[in-house]
Image (tube, coloured by chain):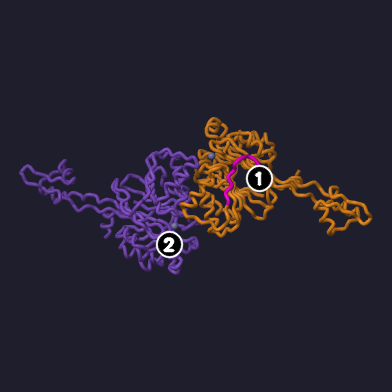
Chain colours: A orange, B purple
Amino acid sequence: MELWFMGTSAGMPIAERNVSSIVLSLTRTKGSLWMFDCGEGTQHQLLRTPLKLSRLTKLFITHLHGDHLFGLPGLLSSRSSLGGTASLDVYGPPGLREFLDAALRLSDTHLNYPFQVHELEAEGAVLDEDGYTVECALLDHRIACFGYRIAEKPRSGSLRVDVLTAAGVPPGPAYGKLKAGEDLRLEDGSVIRAADVLCDPIPGRVVAVMGDTRPCEGALRLAQGADVLVYEATFGADLAEKAEQYGHSTTLQAAETAKAANISRLLITHFSSRYGPDQLAELETQARGVFPQTDAAMELQAYPIPSPSFRTNLA
Amino acid sequence: MELWFMGTSAGMPIAERNVSSIVLSLTRTKGSLWMFDCGEGTQHQLLRTPLKLSRLTKLFITHLHGDHLFGLPGLLSSRSSLGGTASLDVYGPPGLREFLDAALRLSDTHLNYPFQVHELEAEGAVLDEDGYTVECALLDHRIACFGYRIAEKPRSGSLRVDVLTAAGVPPGPAYGKLKAGEDLRLEDGSVIRAADVLCDPIPGRVVAVMGDTRPCEGALRLAQGADVLVYEATFGADLAEKAEQYGHSTTLQAAETAKAANISRLLITHFSSRYGPDQLAELETQARGVFPQTDAAMELQAYPIPSPSFRTNLA
Ligand SMILES: [Zn+2]
Ligand SMILES: [Zn+2]
């Protein structure tokens, strides 16, 4: 699993940063890409990465502000031109369907792949498939805005080969049955219980991606215990009033949410265009004062999300 | 007057070229910019030029295909964020208003400047103001598509100071009246006719900007005698059948239109994404075989349009 930021700028692009879009490159569903938000120029940014638009299978829109949305019609169209044929699902707030219908119909755009828009009517489960669950919650912005929590399902633990060997069970079909949770009756009539020879399930990773928001209960709930939290820090610590007024968060508020949710790593993004490239380090420093495991997200580089077993080895 | 190409790629962006947008930087209306088409990423391209979005006052859309349109909502929004307050007029085919209404309303975008959409209902005059006229004609594409002819109005010629001096008329208010076309009665009763002491009017420049099209009568009419013709060459000479099928032109057809319309300079653009940067010279060569004064348009550089007097001096 890797996160890539296509854009980290709030409101409009500047020379050094594009508007919002984040790609989650999955490992479990071989090679699939999921995208969160699609500001104008997202498809251009993808051209500067090894990520292939044809591998995109799911798109989650946090809210319909232009800097999170206006790249979507062009990206859908180019995915078709580039030969993408796999089905594509797009999730987002009500109004998303009307926007896409108008843009695709009036531009006479025809997509060469099955395409579904899912408007989110309520908080809760968004999907449960292919080893992942996604849930959403309402955030606190100027218009309806959702955050997403993406969780890998736990994988069954490995077999305790040492115990099986001691019990005289050689490798073979029996191992597969035990691994699948079936108990095994031996020739001498004794029973080996699967539960006794299976290690604990390996927990899946959790990535929480927020849209624009003031600090709020929904974000805190979605972020709970996440391996990585992506949270906006539109403004520096000194502009809390502006953040409140426009429905955004400061660096400190982002860090406080991360701390309260007990997450492992915070990536802040969606920086106001007032901050030049030299000022992002200062924003990062502000957040680290509250939550040290914070980075200001950089565009067009991979942020690997370590697997839990890898974490354990390091611990 | 200068032309700038923000994008020269057909259909979708590639690493080296963006989708369609052309800026005409006017001299007569001090500092104003007019734009033709606005593909996705046009505002990003502007950031790489000295051209200021706040100076944009008129926008002409040739047709509603996404590669000519999808940058428009974001560009309008950023113009507002960047402090643009001057009124903005947008011209284009029917459907343009519905597209913009949907995009701006659903994204909750509010523009801090007066903004009018003018849907073109017929061929002919589009506007006549500030020393310029613009007319449009229908082209031959897959959907309704307009070309535009922008003409500077002629300026009154300079006064023949040699004749006036010989007649004993000293510089002063009388010169202004003559220049404005009023005849002058001298103290001795004789009359100096304005027409006799005014040089010929200085003709204005003509720029013709076509949208996507097969060769057609409308393009030929708009291009007639233009100083610069911008015409699409989506395909090389060997792909005439594809051009016909998709409503486009080849390099040869572009050059033949230029020759038939007796223009001064042809700029070809809208190159299929199949052509890499190394292949544009070959497209240029094909067109030059028919019309030598052809260039394949390059992005983000100025193409000055010489004034007629400058042309005369050179002749
Ligand atoms: Zn927003
Ligand atoms: Zn077209």
Secondary structure under badge 1? strand
The one of A155 and B82 positioned closer to us in this rendering: A155
Stretch in magenta: A116-126
The one of B56 and B129 positioned closer to us in this rendering: B129
Q: In this view, does A103 lie above or below A146?
A: below
Quarter assignment of residue A290: top right
* Residue B176 visible in rendering: yes
The amino acid at mark 2 is: Gly
Quarter assignment of residue A264: top right
The amino acid at mark 1 is: Val
The one of B50 and B22 positioned closer to us in this rendering: B22
Please indicate whether residue A19 sits to the left or right of residue A125 in the image: left
Secondary structure under badge 2? loop
**Residue A155 on the magenta span:** no
List the residue tagged with mark 2. Answer: B247
Please indicate whether residue A141 sits to the left or right of residue B86 in the image: right
Q: Is circle 1 on the same chain as circle 2?
A: no
* Residue B300 visible in rendering: no
Residue A255, given in percent of the width and then of the height, sits at 63, 35
Which image quarter is the C terminus of chain A in? top right
Residue B26, given in percent of the width and then of the height, sits at 34, 48
List the residue tagged with mark 1. Answer: A134
* Alpha carbon distance from label 1 to label 2: 44 Å
Q: Categorize mark 2 by other alpha carbons within 10 Å: few (<14), some (14-19), many (20+).
A: some
* Residue for point 60% across, 55% down: A87
Q: In this view, does B209 lie above or below A63?
A: below
**Residue A117 on the magenta span:** yes
